[in-house]
Structures are given as C-alpha cells and as structure tokens.
Image: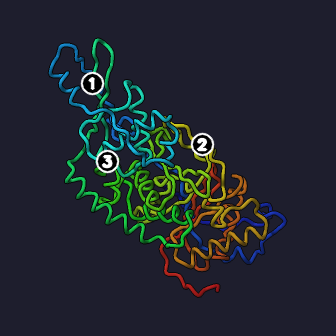
Amino acid sequence: MVWYRKWRGKGKKGDSTQIKNWKPPVSSRRLAAGLCIAALASAISGCQFPEEFAGIIEPVEEVVSTVRQNMELKQQMDALELPKDIRSISKGRYAYGSLSKEEQKIYDQMLDAVLNHDKEVTLSTAEGGRLEDIFNCIKADYGGLFWVESFRYTQYQRNGETEMVSFSPNYTMAVEEREAVQKKIDKRAKKYLKAIRPDASDYEKVRNIYRMLIQKVDYNLKAENNQNIISVFLDRETVCQGYASAMQYLLDQLDIPCVIITGTAKGGPHAWNMVKLDGEWYYVDVTWGNSKYHDEEENDVKYVEYDYLNITTEEMLRGHNPQVTFDLPECTAVKDNYFVREGKYFSSLDEASAAKIGAIFKKAFQKGKKNVSVKFSSSELCRKAKEYFLTEYHISEYCGGLETVYYKTDMELHIFVIIFPNYTVNYTHGR
C-alpha cells in the first residue's frame, strides 16, 4: 500500500535554479491556483510466503533403503528400471545451461518423470546431494509445473554402498485433475497471447504481458495456490511466485527466454524474473510493478508502474538479493529498459527536456491514463523535476483543468511518477 499526504499552496517565486538558464514566466504559475498535490510515499511491500515455505520447493525427503538380506527391498530394487536416456527438451533454457553435462542428464530424467506423472524413476547418479539444486533449476526454467511441488529420493544401499538412487515427485493432484486444470489454464492464457499483435517486437511482448498480469491479477497473500499459475489464470489473485511463474509460462509460449529468480527483497522471500531481449539479459519484477495508492475516499486504486521492467543488475540489487543455485549474468544493457525504449529517460533538465516531459504528462492526461512516469540519470534531476512541475505547478501548463494530482519520487531509481485521479477530460483541449 502506498500512502500520501496533502497540502495546498502557491508556487515559488523567482526560483530559476530548477531549470538551467530558464526562468518560467510568472503567468504560468497563476494557472495552478487551487491545484491539490498529494505526495505518495515509496512503500512497496515485499512478497511474503507462508511460514512453512522453505524456498522454491518444500524440504526434500530422503529415504535410505538398505538391501542386504531384506528380500522385499531387494525385489523392489530389482523391479526398478535402469536410468533412461532422455532426449532433452530444455536446451536454451537458462538454468539448464548452467549445469554440467551429468547434471543436465539428471535434470532431463527428473523433468521427464514430472511431465509423465511417473511415481518413481531411477536416476543416473549414486549421490543425492545435488538433486534439490537440480530440481530447483527445473522449477526456475518451467513456470507451468503447477501439479508438483516437491519430491523425495531413495538411496538403495548394499553393504553400506549406494547402488541406486530413485526420484519420486510429490504431486498435488491426479493426472485427470491435472489435465482438466491445464485445459482451463490454456483457455485463459490464450487470451493473454491473443492480445499481443503478431508483428509486436519482443520488447513489446514483454511489456504487454507485464502490464496485463498486473491489470488482470490482484496481489493477495491469502490467495489459494499462490505458489503456482493456477492462482493467476483461474483465481486471478496471487503473490510474487505466481506472478513470476506466469511471466515465464507466457513468455515461453512467445519464444522469449525467461527464467524465475528467487531470493529476498526488503528482508522477505521474493520471486521475480530475468528475460533475454536482443541478446541481452534484463531483470523484471511484475509484483513490484503492481502498485496502489489510497485516494481521498479511502479507496485502494491500483495502477501499473514500470520501474522494474527490464532493469540492470545494479538497479535490481538495490532492493533484491538473489539466492539461486545457478550463476547469474551481469545485466548491464539499457537499450530495452522501459524508460529508454519509450523515450521517457532524461539525462538533463534544460528547457527542451522540460518541454518534452511536459508533453509526456499532457498526452497521458488527455488520453485518460491513470499514471505516467519518467526516469532521470540522477536523483538530483529527479528532485528538480518534482520541484519544477509540482512545487512551481508548471504541470498545469500541460494538463489544463487538473485540480488534484498524486505523485511519487523513487530516488533510488531516479523515477518521478504522476498519478491522475479519474476525471472527464476534454480530449480536444490543447491540440
């Protein structure tokens, strides 16, 4: 929840330091008489998991069976098939690519078992220590595995030596129920995919999926199935794990590389994504793009923020701490950052830049947008923009008839957000 305070007042007089070498005319300040400004505190809540949650999967159950003279266990071991050579379907997936060839072979066997709903399969290993890490890689690469949440493995020993290790997924539903749920999910997911233009760029696909997930799905800690995509597509309320899983699931169908990243944010468990665009990796956090503010009538008003759409490692690490078992790249590209791609990134605040920013606010206001945001190369420029457009009320030069405005400044990411209350706007005004 984002809270605000309000005040009224007139613009400052003679403060020409806000815009370099440019002193706005006095008449422009008179346009803002009566404008009510509400400051939104930057208070994004982290995603919380149930108390019993222990990472991306529940604790792995290890079973050690000693064969020796126990004929029943010997028969059980003899009944197990030899490890299968599985043709991989995961080449190109990020977490899979981080594993050694031997670990990739185990990954393929485990994934094949989950997809086929097998009860128990033999793995190409006599060690169980890395199985949880490998299974977590599967869950990071595949956001759509809603019917499995954990697994158990069994070590079969003879004379103190492990001869065989089996893998048994813990399913949350039977095959028939899984198939029925999958059909319902596919129907809902198709609506998301149909909303994407056939000629859309990969950047536009990621941006639109990000926006639709926020608009269509509410954040709710009490949502059922909130650790998988059932909560997103069928219940339309979830938490960060559901958002991240759905993002991966949808982008996978659009042939855009995407992996789920887990760790902590603001001191609590969290999940987000990493996506690959034009050969470069970026971080995306759908949960932190789902924001709300508290209006005058005590209503929660949801809006989409793009602060965490395609950002760098340096920016992400300001509030996030990845805790995955695979190495992560250093994300440094900015070409497909939302603000750069949309022409809303500014490295100066001279007369020309101020006019461009004002035009951005005007376009959003006249189109009835709920909010609009711009990003700067420094926190100082962000502060100056807030002073110029709000403290001095120059926003009224671009948004005629605006009486109340909410705003938020994120000084860590240098982002200035303007939120417009719902007004009926004369769309021909100012054209």
Question: Is residue 228 left or right of 431 when viewed as pictured?
Answer: left
**Quadrant location of the C terminus in the rendered image:** bottom right
Residue 339 vs 364, above or below: the answer is above
* Whether label 3 touches label 1, CB < 8 Å: no
Q: Nearer the viewer, mark 2 or mark 1?
A: 1
Residue 26 vs 250, above or below: the answer is below
* Whether label 2 touches label 3, CB < 8 Å: no
**Quadrant location of the N terminus in the rendered image:** bottom left
- Across and down, in percent, residue 145 comes to 34, 49
Residue 42 vs 424, above or below: the answer is above
Query: Amino acid under label 2?
Result: Pro
Residue hosting label 1: 63
Upstream in sequence: badge 2 or badge 1: 1
Q: How many marks?
A: 3
Label 1 neighbourhood size at 10 Å, few (<14), some (14-19), many (20+)? few
> Circle 3 — which element?
helix
Upstream in sequence: badge 2 or badge 3: 3
Report the front residue among 319 and 30: 319
Q: Quadrant of residue 29?
A: bottom right
Label 3 neighbourhood size at 10 Å, few (<14), some (14-19), many (20+)? few
Residue hosting label 2: 329
Query: Amino acid under label 1?
Result: Val
Disc sitting over residue 115 in the figure:
3
